[in-house]
Image (cartoon, rainbow, N blue to C red):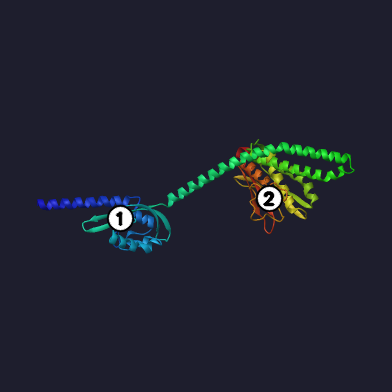
Amino acid sequence: MSDQSGALQALRTLQLSEARWQAILDTARDAVICIDPHGIVTLFNRAAETIFGYDAADVVGRNVKMLMPVPYTDEHDEYIRSYRETGRAKAIGRIREVHARRKNGEVFPIELSVSEARVGAEVIYSAIIRDMTERQAIQAELASARQIAQQRERLADIGAITARIVHDLGNPLAGISMQARLLLRRANREPAPPFAALREPAERIAEEVRRLDHLIREFLDFTRQQRLELRNIALAPFLRDLTDMWRPVAAEREIELGLEVDDAPMVDADEEKLRRVLDNLVKNAIEAIDRGPGRVALRIERNPTHVRIVVRDNGPGVPPTLQMFRMFETTKRNGSGLGLSIAKQIMVAHGGDIGFEPVIPHGASFYVDLPAPTATGM
């Protein structure tokens, strides 16, 4: 009886030990796969099932090549044969980053560690596999974030230098402008040659100086932080006043300027800067049509989160390749390409946005979004 009890105890100990190892394998976060010397899978734990998408019953007893993409699947049998014959290992005892293949065919990155063990005369190769998909995605995001941060730092340096240069151009331009005005006065006082011949080039110089001065002012405005003086604005009278100011300009080009406003809400905004944004949009719409007949219309749209002011025209539209809110992007021959970039800054500072939608068959619809008024402000 004592021999029998000892045998039972040994069996229980063996079963308990096997249960412990099975529990460890089942709860491991990494895939554990064992193969025999011929590449046949003998063990496939639960993490391996999760990572590869196979049930263990689908894999155990089959060649491990089924878990590999090309070219590994073509090379693996030759690698095992070569290792058995020469003892020279390429993967055993090392940690490598390679690729594996899921049941659905997806090829994904893994970290692979292979070891060899002998149990009596039997040789077992075991692999611990970690899915690197998420880690590599995080690393790629971090690398991208670092690159963007470096680019922004360089752009900030370039912006600071450029702003200083642009600022310092103001005095020389003022001097050139003054000299051009003096030449014009002299030419106007003495219309006979040789001073008469100076009038046209002096006017061109003065015009170019004005254009450069406008560009400098816009650029400096772009580089400054947008500081707002918010107050409650009634949109209906605000937009009526704006259209009244632009209607003669539009009429001169035979363009109809319309306003669709009924019960417009109150909004919190910097009136001067909001006016600047909308002036820019209306001016662009009129200039896009150039000569009538044509129509530019302003209207208000509301939803629970924002109030939208739309400026729509039936002009030729915007080229699809044009990035309108990027610095120096413009279709105008003498445009600075800064107006819409500044408008974007102003609207973002308001907690809103500015955008564009094409109009079919032709035309453009620009919109300005402002945060919707709160219940107490309505």
* Viewer-proximal residue among 278 and 288: 288
* Visible residue check, residue 215: yes
Q: Which disc, if any, is residue 126?
A: 1
Judge the density around disc 1: few (<14), some (14-19), many (≥20) Cα neighbours within 10 Å.
many
Residue 86: name its quadrant.
bottom left
**Residue at left 56%, top 43%?**
152
Which quarter shows the C terminus? top right
Which secondary structure lies at badge 2? loop
Tell me how many marks there are: 2
Q: Which amino acid does label 2 sit on?
A: Thr
In primary-sequence order, the first of circles 2 and 1 is 1
Which secondary structure lies at badge 1? strand
Q: Where is residue 373 in the image (x, y as percent from the top left)?
A: 62, 41
Q: Is residue 293 left or right of residue 90?
A: right
Q: Where is residue 267 in the image (x, y as percent from the top left)?
A: 65, 40
Residue 233: name its quadrant.
top right
Distance from disc 2 to disc 1, alpha carbons, whole Å, reads 63 Å
Judge the density around disc 2: few (<14), some (14-19), many (≥20) Cα neighbours within 10 Å.
some
Q: Is residue 95 left or right of residue 310?
A: left
* Viewer-proximal residue among 247 and 115: 115
* Viewer-proximal residue among 123 and 351: 123
Q: Where is residue 246 in the image (x, y as percent from the top left)?
A: 76, 46
Residue 108: name its quadrant.
bottom left
Q: In this view, does 162 lie above or below 90?
A: above
Residue at the right extreme of this rendering: 192
Q: Which amino acid does label 1 sit on?
A: Ser
* Viewer-proximal residue among 282 and 241: 282
Q: Is residue 48 left or right of residue 122?
A: right
Q: Is residue 90 above or below residue 215?
A: below
**Residue at left 24%, top 52%?**
18
Q: Name the residue under label 2.
A: 330
Q: In this view, does 361 lie above or below 330?
A: below
